[in-house]
Image (cartoon, helix red, strand yellow):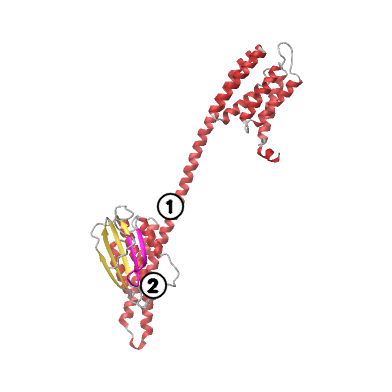
Amino acid sequence: MRRARRRFKQPSRQDWLTTAVIGALTVPMAFVARDDGKVTDTLGWVLLAAMVLLTAWRRLYPLGALLALAPIQGLYHFLDNAPTAPVVASVVILYSLAVAGPRRRTFVVVPALLVLTLTMMMNVNVHQGLELVRTSGWILACTLLGEAVRVHRNYVGAIVERAERAERTREETAARRVAEERLRIARDLHDLLAHSITLIGIQTSVAAHVLNADPARLDRDTLAQALDGIADTCREARGELKRTLEVLRAEEDSGPPPGLGGLADLVRAAESAGATASLVVAADGEVPPAVGAAAYRIVQQGLTNAVQHAGPAVGVQVSVRLDEASSALLVDVVDEGSPAGDTATDRPPGFGLVGMRERARSVGGTVVAGPRADGPGFAVRAVLPCTGAAEPAGLDMGELAHD
């Protein structure tokens, strides 16, 4: 019983206020005397009160309220009470049924009940039957009015829902763009600062090593070369940082993005840090700017990782090669690692490989990176499609080039 009472919805305060107004309009109509002088009796008042109370549940159970109203109103008229008294309650319940919908239920239930009631009234009292025929137009009019209100509400609700959906889509798009922009900024700053700071650290360690190795026989040329390398790296870092900030400030004249033309500078910077680097560019076709910029950043990160993991006292050998295959640019960065086997495996993982993969994925490409299979060292292969293909046909991404 308790669960049943919880499931049974209770009318709100607004429903009860509406019911009170309907009752106030119904009472005067029940005092109207018929032509023969008969007025509403006690049982008629009880039935009339029951019909008015049903309007409190008209919004919660519109069909149930109408089906309960029909027999009560039939008995009320059968007892020959004032015929116009139940009109207000009947019209309100019919209107609520039409507003609640659906349309098919409204246009089946209302005419069926109207025909059934009219048939019964004609058999019981022809005079009241004719009176019902006269008022049936108002019944149908209220039903059509409720249907019109329902259609209007659905139309307005659909417009509001579309507007809210569009607003949510705009907010999600803006949030996604902000996240993508933050990721791009983080990637650019990582590529720039990690490369420059690593080279500066290596060159500083070389200078410190020269000073501490044999102060009596100071190799001034090597020290000067290391210091000049630090100065050059600082200038390059400052220039790239300026270009990055100009892009972030959305200035029109921010210069072209780095491309294949800047690979030689990366190799020279790695050599200034003590590495032995070689560069082979076998790509004769025109490379899109976005693909060139991705290749530049991947090579930059590959050289940075090679120099950083080998350490300042080891002249690591790194080879960089760019080829074309199946309308794609192949980028290979292969190092031979540390001869002593010290590859700094105890270092905490960074964002270098993650940034490489994100760079490649931004142009529809892929990156495979891992230890070399034919010797010590590390190899990186990037496949960057120049025509929008995700991966060139016939290319085995499980094989790394070690030229």
Q: Hey, which quadrant is residue 255 in on the image?
A: bottom left
- Per the model, the C-alpha gap separating discs 1 and 2 is 35 Å
Main SS of the magenta part reads: strand
* Label number found at residue 309: 2
Figure check: 328 above or below 83: below
Residue 367 seen in the figure: yes
CB within 8 Å, label 1 to label 2 = no
Residue at 58% x, 21% y is 112
Can you name the residue that lies furthest to the right here? 42
160 part of magenta stretch: no
Q: Residues within 10 Å of mark 2 (few under 14, many from 20)?
A: some
Q: Which portion, as a residue range, is magenta? A: 366-382
Residue at the disc numbered 1? 177
The one of 331 and 87 positioned closer to us in this rendering: 331
Percent across and percent down for residue 84 are 67, 18
Residue at 71% x, 23% y is 48
Figure check: 65 above or below 267: above
* Label number found at residue 30: none
Figure check: 290 above or below 204: above
Please state, as top left, top right, bottom left or bottom right, where the N terminus lies in the image.
top right
Percent across and percent down for residue 398 are 34, 62
Can you name the residue that lies furthest to the bottom here? 216
| Amino acid at dot 1 | Arg
| Amino acid at dot 2 | His
Percent across and percent down for residue 31 are 73, 18
